[in-house]
Each structure stands twice: as C-alpha cells, then as structure tokens.
Image (cartoon, rainbow, N blue to C red):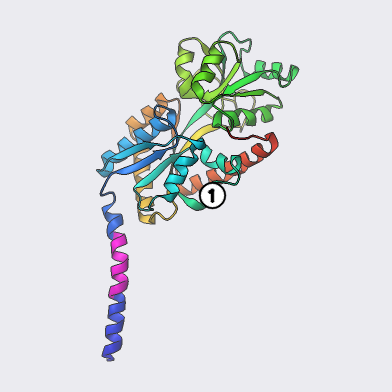
Amino acid sequence: MNTSLFRSGLFGLLAATAAVLPLQVAAQAYPSKPVKIVVGYSAGGAVDIVARTLGQSLGGSLGQPFIVDNKPGAGTNIAVKQVIDAPADGYTLMLAANALAANMSLYQPAPFDAERDLVAISLVGRVPVVIAANANAPYANIGKLIEAAKAKPNTIAFASPGNGATPHMAVELFARAAGVSLQHIPYRGGAQAITDVIGGQVPLLAMNALEVSPHVKSGKLKVLAVLSPNRSAIFPDVPTIAESGFPGFEASVWYALMAPAATPKAIVTQLHAEVQKALKTPEVQQRMTAVGGEVLPGSMEMVAKLIRSERQRYEKLVREANIKPD
C-alpha cells in the first residue's frame, strides 16, 4: 500500500468531513437562540397579528422565542432589505405579503429581486380585500355599484391606505375585470381613509377585512364584496366576487414566510414542516379566522410560483394604470 497516498486521502476525507459537520450540527441544533420574524408593517395590523400568532406556535414547538420585529416604511422595502442583508442562518425570517411581489414593479429601479434574494419557507394564509361603502351609500351590492360606475365613468371614488397598497391594487384589478373606471383617493394609512368614508367624504373604501370589521359591526360601513374565492368568516353573508359574477377573480392579501436566499436547506425544510404543523392547530386557525382570513398551507414551490405570477400581474397593472408609490 502507498502509505503517503493513504494518508493524503484520509486527511482529505477528514478535512471534508470537518467542513460539512458544523453545517450539519448547526442544522440539527436549530434553533439554539431566539429567532426574529421581521414584519414591514406597524404593530396591530393583520400582518403583525398573523406573524405573532405563527411565532408563538413555532416558539412552542421549537423551544426558542420567535420575536416579531416591526420595521414599517418605504412600502415594506426597509424590512425586505434588512432580511436580505441578514446572515443566512435561519435566525432572521420575514412574514411577507403582496408588497413583496408588487414593489419590484412599483419602485424603479427595483429595490430587490425576491426570487433571487429570498427563499420561500411556506405559505401561511390569506385575508380578503373588501370593497366597503358608507352605510348610507346607494349601492346595495357590487352589482349596483358596477351599474352606477358604468353610467358615470371615473366619478365614483374609493379610498385606500395609499398608492400601490394592496387594497388599491386589488380594486384596480377588479375595476379592469368589471370594465369600469373608479377614481382613487390615496391616504397615508387606513385609519383616516376609514374615517372619511364613514363621514361621507368618500363613498367607497378598499381595505382588508380585519380593519373594516369593527365598523361593519357598528353599522357605520357595509361590505359590498369580498375579493377572495371563499366567503369571509367575519362576513359570512357577503357574497364573494366570484358569486357576484366574476368567477376566477381573486385579489386577497396573502402571507408567506421567507428567509435570506442562502439559508441552509435543512433549516428551510425544518421550518416548512413546523409551519405546516402550526397551521393545523386550533389556535392558529382561530386567530386567522378572527382577522377575517384563513390558513393556507402550501409548499415552498407554491410560494415561489405565487410570487412569480403576482409579480407579472402587478407589473402589467402598474404599467397600464401608471401607478406610482407614495
């Protein structure tokens, strides 16, 4: 036997094993410290509530705290960049929503490439965007609104949380599907938009289901349609947009858990499995129902496909409607 070759091969094998072993140990030991879930929105909103609910469940099953870090600003771009630039070790995650796909077209040059810079862990859920109106508005349902909008194009206004916000984009997509033209009134956030619609300054409101729910219960607003394939648990009597004559149309707010692109596959796979378990628990399902949505388990490939298709959908809308971010 050639002793020198044997020693050389043995040392090479040991060196290769030594290089791989820390990665395997790190993945097996994950998580060994608190995990941060970055959210590009203020505390108290639907995305924040979903992130905290999911984080609490993951923390219970994995034995380490999952802490929500709210980083609002620049249409969630600040939060996205923080996650992209974070160490790809599984300790910085992001609960992303539609803005992740939309902002690559809204902001030019594109601030990031979600398909290149991030890796999908799992779909989490969705909450419908609703079209609501002042309780005294003359529109009994979405059909009556469409009739009125066709009779007087671009005279009926709707308020939204801002230019390029998901509710704004959702109603623009719906208006094109319905063949109508509505006037958009952007606000800086949802609170003042809701106040002005309740007060009668603006007739319509585009908002996620959670934020309008208290005002519908109090009788100050009425929901004309939910822009999702299923009826909302908090508005069970309101028809979906498909039931209102637009089968196949959907414009929901979706949520997906993401990580930096180079995060070890073992950790991504582990987190994916844990999220699937969390979405089956009554606590998570009940919390999603409470915000007007539903859990939406899905593979990593489903998230990647969703982001790609949504990116194309928003790119076309931004170009045709000449939408600019606030």
Residue named by callout 1: 113
Residue 166 in which image quadrant: top right
Q: Is residue 165 above or below residue 312?
A: above
- Nearer to the camera, 43 or 259: 43
Quadrant where the image shows the C terminus: top right
The residue located at (31%, 81%) in the rendering is: 9
The residue located at (58%, 21%) in the rendering is: 159
Please provide the residue range marked out in magenta: 14-24
**Image position of 76 (left or right of 104):** left
Residue type at tag 1: Asp
Q: Residue furthest bottom?
A: 1
- Nearer to the camera, 286 or 218: 218
How many discs appear? 1
Q: Is residue 22 magenta?
A: yes
Residue 2 in which image quadrant: bottom left
Q: Is residue 238 magenta?
A: no
| Magenta segment, prevailing SS (helix, strand or loop) | helix
Rendering coords of residue 68 (x, y %): 35, 37
- Nearer to the camera, 237 or 209: 209
Q: Is residue 274 above or below residue 248?
A: below
